[in-house]
Image (spheres, helix red, strand yellow):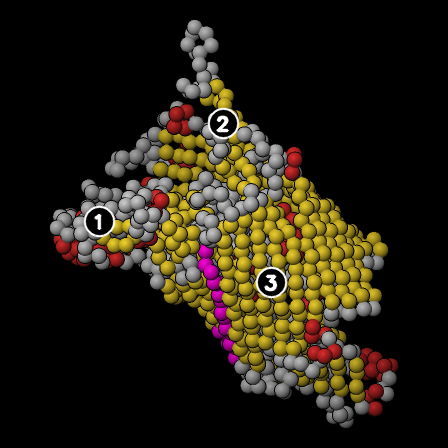
Amino acid sequence: MRKTLTLLVRKRGFQCCVLSLGTMMYLATPSLATASSADTRKHQQTSPQKEITLSGKVVTSNNEGLPGVTVLVSESDGANKQGTTTNEKGEFSFSNLETGKKYNLQFSYIGFDKQSLNDFVLTEANSNSISITLKESASDLSEVVVVGYGSTVKKDITGSVKSLKSAEFNQGIINSPEQLLQGKVSGVNVTSATGEPGGKTNITVRGPGGVRTGSTPLFVVDGMALDNSSTGGDTNPLNFLNPQDIESMDVLKDASATAIYGARGANGVILITTKKGKSGQASVNYSGSLGLSTMARPLDVLSGPDFIAEAGKLGSTVINGGANTDWQKEISRTATTHNHNVSIGGGTEKMTYYGSFGLQKQQGVLKGSQQDRYTGRINLSQKLLNDRVTLDINLNATNTKNQRPDNQGIIGGAITANPTYKPYDDKGDPFQYQDGTNPLITLRLYKELLSTNRVLASISPSVTIIPGLVYKLNFGLDHATSTQDKQTLPNTIPASIGRLETYDLKNSNRLIENYLTYTLNKKSHSFSALVGHSYQRIFLQGRNFSINKFPISDIEPIYNPGLGQDLTLVLNKPGGFATINELQSFFSRVNYSFKDKYLVTATLRVDGSSKFGANNKYGSFPSFSLGWRISEEPFMKSSPFSDLKLRAGWGKTGNQEIPSKITQARFTSSVSGTTSYPLNSTNTYPAGTTYTRLANPNIQWEVSAQTDLGLDFSLFKGALSGEIDYFSKTSEKILLEVIPSDPVQPAGTFWTNVPDMQIVNKGLEFDLNFRKSLDNGLRYSIGGNITFIKNDVKNSPYSVIPSGAAQGSGLTSATINGYINNQPIGTFFLKEFIGFDDKGISKFRDTDGDGIITDKDRIAAGTALPTRMYNFNGNVSFKGFDLTANFNGVGGNKVYDNTANSNFYKLKLSKGVNVTPEALEAASESINNSAPVSTRYLKNGAYLRLNNLVLGYNLNTVKLGIHKWVQTARVAVTGQNLIVWTKYNGYDPEVNNDRSINGITSYGIDYLSYPKAKTVIFSLNLGF
């Protein structure tokens, strides 16, 4: 929509002068209009320059003063830039400006169109009479959205795409990009698997669709497609990105949008665009914060007195140490997080630059855990040869250091330790008691150190060959190296000989792409075509070694492995691996628009992957989508809709996220009674070579076909806007490692596409936003989204494909969930607990009626996947203050409390192990009753979380007298994870421990998970 800025100059002897930048139209009284330019130049040349104050007012369309508007002024060449914000009446002023000079003024405020006034000649007559009218942003139709290999405006999109700008991101302590959009995009489920700094995050777009192929979407950073492989340790590989450097994130959800990425688009695509410089005087920005974090929801275990009393009721004798120790408090702390970022950006009309440095030092709420991240970024853009050539260079370097204790060891120790024991002895050392291990000793003896260096660089020259035809080359490199040390110190009590394990990992990803884009706009027709080629090579290499038996000394094994005395290969055999994956692709896309109303998009990508056999190395992935902008039809001109667009799309995408080399045969050589025999009288047994995997060159691509129907709408000049989408995604040719039907086989398993098996995701997405500005300067907005999704496994030839296993004493390897016909992925496959018999022993339903409780009596007891995901948020601002709240939640899902299953029942308390009150609720339960895996520990996983609450204030730097040095200043306090409403009584319902079986992803299992933190953050932002 046309942006209009109105300038009124009231001058004695004249009526008014109106400047409309949208049309460049000047209106004036006749006397002013006839004043010659020569007279004006003569006046400017003869009048002496004088320092005066420029003042004015910013108002709404209702002529009400608008407070909090950011106003920037600079000389016409960009020099001497100053900034301020308007007061409660909408007034602003700048002092010490010179008359006769030309100035540029810029006005911006959230929810309003940006305005600018260029080459304004300051005189004494017009210095105090500027009035600026800011128009509310009518809609986001002209918003630029990044799509694969290009960008477009929102109104021309025919697929399901959601774009988030940096102002819309989640606030708080952010370790990875996924957390920025949690709850912000319908159809996208982001689950933090742990509360540990730098811990892994699970993300799915419109539900998971594979068994062994994973569900993580493809991430593309500034045109560089990332590999989802680990960069070392149990951390999130996306931690290397500084959230402060990200300008926008665009989520491609349906096949018509993702098919341009072919083989890797089945799980969705997330495009990350980093910040770029802008022409003009350099601007420097600093942001800093201090966060204080505590354990959000400690488990409700028995206190010392309750422990003695409840054990007495069971007739058990436990040791009373006389203390009342909160062991969870002993292993945790009030953690601090320091975050500092400095950026500089600017440039000329031909060259722009952006540079930044970031530092984040984050302590975990558990003692001994920490992540330190150092990031540096440089983005450059240079125009050459009369703007026919553009060269873009992006460089990001990150060093990340992670330290972690034995998380499960200290958590398990803290929640089960006798609370009557004191934590320290008289010497201040961790107290050693006879019937258990003090978790503080575990904390002292074990630690992991991980150091990761990652460089992401790309260079992208583009050349305009003829008007409308552009050639672009994109060359990128993503290189990561890491070293992980796992150290156990030698110790006397408890006995430990000491051990050091070291793992080195190298991950190198190279990409080169060439493509041509042709654009033609002629009258009612708009046409663009894209054709290109891509080649990507990923090299992974890992090595590891270990050594045992260290002497007790002040020197830690990590600093001198040579002190280790056990060098035998039985316990310390070195290992390693190396893999090369290659992907070659040909891609094309055509966009056509007629009269800006009827839209068509078609894409085709052909991918060839080294992961597949010779018979099916290449796969083709087409898509097609249509759009109809109904609001542009003549019969809609008098309707309240400022935009109404109907979308429909269909496409196929592929998935190649499977282990490398599975189409090839694999052998192993060993000396054993079944693989070797003596070849001569010396009784020397040579190594025998056997198959461990058979070759299968016929393995095909796993393919997802998706249909999407969408409606975008905007009413009341953009005040109310939203989107509605229906989608259906079916994944076929499911890749799986199976057991051969013929029992006489040289290998125990082989990989294949399961015939007829399907995984289906269907759902509805609703997204709605409303914003309003009142005449008194109060502005508010509310919005939200909700997704209803149903996931089903169809035509599986297996009764169950196990995907999640239990852990704990007596529970190891027991199946918890899996893939079951006509049930969602992540379905819990359990015996149904129905109470206790007359002896106090657990009873389970005999579902097959044979009178015996076996695995055949297991039932589908619910799923870990939510059937609904929702978010709602609100913002209100007034006179420089602003308050933002963001809530997100899920429903319809369950969580298996493996922690309670392995630790909290009466038998444990009778043996001196602490438990929760819940474990003692059943009076009829015997102290001899065990706790096998069953629905007894299956719990409701629904929750509603107050994810962010931010209160901020924009300071008036003019009133503070610092505007010459500081243009903008903002202070804020942020609450993160303040409240969670849930029936789940574990640490947190948003959990997903990795309990996978044979590489098949598990869902919704909670076992000694690292607790999430409740955080308060104080922040300061300065612009210079």
Q: Position of residue 687 (x, y in %)?
A: 47, 18
Q: Residue at x 61, y 40 (%)?
A: 700
**As drawn, 49 above or below 991:** below
Task: Inspect this view and state whether residue 537 appears.
Answer: no
Give the residue at mark 2.
Answer: 745
Q: Classify mark 3: helix, strand or loop.
A: strand
**As drawn, 551 above or below 946:** above
Q: Which residues are magenta?
A: 865-883
Disc 3 marks which amino acid? Lys
Residue found at the very far top of the displayed protein: 681
**As drawn, 752 above or below 124:** above
- Which one is in front, 941 or 494? 941
Say which of marks 2 and 3 sits in front. Answer: 2
- Which one is in front, 817 or 966? 817
Residue found at the very far front of the displayed protein: 849
Disc 2 marks which amino acid? Gln
Q: CA distance from mark 2 to mark 3?
A: 50 Å
**As drawn, 423 above or below 646:** above
Examine the image and state in which quarter residue 286 appears: bottom right
Q: Residue at x 81, y 69 (%)?
A: 524
Disc 1 marks which amino acid? Ile
Q: Classify mark 2: helix, strand or loop.
A: loop
Q: Earlier in the sequence, mark 3 or mark 1?
A: 3
Circle number at residue 95: none
Give the residue at mark 1.
Answer: 841
Mark 3 Cα-neighbour bin, 10 Å: few <14, some 14–19, many ≥20: some
Give the residue at mark 3.
Answer: 162
